Image (cartoon, rainbow, N blue to C red):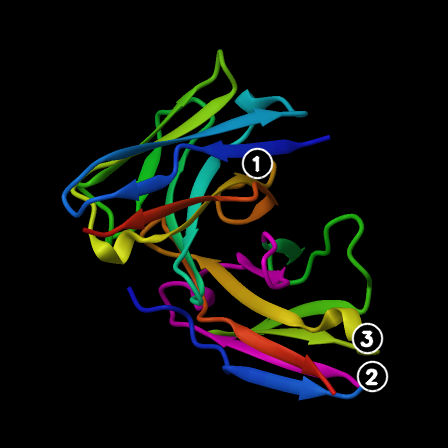
């Protein structure tokens, strides 16, 4: 199964909002409300930011939000801050009972 | 606090075997699905396998099916990954990850990873 499709890179200035898309198929993203998003700084382990499309774990800023329409999910970060600069990965449960990740998006804060 | 500590990585020749371990603490291990996720150098995340709390439900990525075996020892709060017939493309940092409560599909705690290098 191919990875979910994410843009390779996005950028924004401090205070702005950005959105990262994550496109799958009717066998993964579109089949369930089970998309999650992870933030990974260089040399660090991934950190869960959003689960089940739009839920934030305790401790995650409300500047992070998630949504989904059909086979595409999105992560929006509002009020960009320098510390948001990182790689972001989406993932989804699949109809084959497996988990699939996106290729990752590098966020640059200008 | 939740801690996941991986061990067992190292350098192995193509065709060789390696067994990874993950020691879990700070939570009730028997309440959670557990997974292995890997990351090749400079690449993205790739889910490898998950195992249910009881060990009865197991799934693998196609890329490792038939070569890797996930298992757990609930008495020792430990997760394992037996890796056989290793290939160069298995070279990666292997993370142990806990699934969210009552889920198998997202990971709320991660270890720091153990590096596996497959090279002659």
Query: Taking the image as drawn, is residue A51 in sight?
Result: no
Q: Nearer the viewer, residue A106 or A30?
A: A106
* Of the image marks 2 and 3, the number of the one nearer the N terminus: 2
Magenta-drawn segment? A16-45
Q: Are marks 2 and 3 on the same chain?
A: yes
Q: Are marks 1 and 3 on the same chain?
A: no
Above or below, A109 against A33 in this view is below
* Residue A80 at x, y percent in the picture: 80, 78
Q: Which numbered marker is on residue A81?
A: 3
Q: Which numbered marker is on residue B102?
A: 1
Residue A20 counted in the magenta span: yes
Subunit ID for the residue under disc 1: B
Residue at 49% across, 77% down:
A6
**Number of other residues with Cα within 10 Å of mark 2, as a class: few under 14, some 14 to 19, many 20 or more:** some
Q: CA distance from mark 1 to mark 3?
A: 33 Å
Query: Taking the image as drawn, is residue A61 in sight?
Result: yes
Mark 3 lies on a secondary structure that is loop
Mark 2 lies on a secondary structure that is loop
Between disc 1 and disc 3, the foreground one is 3
Contact? badges 2 and 3 (CB < 8 Å): yes
Mark 1 lies on a secondary structure that is loop
Contact? badges 2 and 1 (CB < 8 Å): no
């Amino acid at each position: 199964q191919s990875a979910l499709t994410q843009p390779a890179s996005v950028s924004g200035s401090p205070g702005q909002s950005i959105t990262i898309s994550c496109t799958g198929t009717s066998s993964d993203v579109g089949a369930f409300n089970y998309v999650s998003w992870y933030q990974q700084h260089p040399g660090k382990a991934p950190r869960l930011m959003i689960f089940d499309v739009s839920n934030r774990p305790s401790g995650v800023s409300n500047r992070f939000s998630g949504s989904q329409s059909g086979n595409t999910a999105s992560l929006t970060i509002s009020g960009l801050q320098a510390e948001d600069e990182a790689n972001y990965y989406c993932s989804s449960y699949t109809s084959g009972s497996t988990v699939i990740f996106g290729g990752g998006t590098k966020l640059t804060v200008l | 606090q939740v801690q996941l500590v991986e061990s067992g990585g190292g350098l192995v020749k193509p065709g060789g075997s390696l067994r990874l371990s993950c020691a879990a603490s700070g939570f009730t291990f028997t309440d959670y699905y557990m997974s292995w996720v890997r990351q090749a150098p400079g690449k993205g995340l790739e889910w490898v396998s998950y195992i249910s709390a009881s060990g009865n439900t197991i799934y693998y990525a196609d890329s490792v099916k038939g070569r890797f075996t996930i298992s757990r020892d609930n008495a020792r709060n430990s997760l394992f990954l037996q890796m056989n017939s290793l290939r160069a493309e298995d070279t990666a940092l292997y993370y142990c990850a806990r699934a969210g409560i009552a889920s198998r599909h997202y990971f709320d705690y991660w270890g720091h990873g153990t590096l596996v290098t497959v090279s002659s």
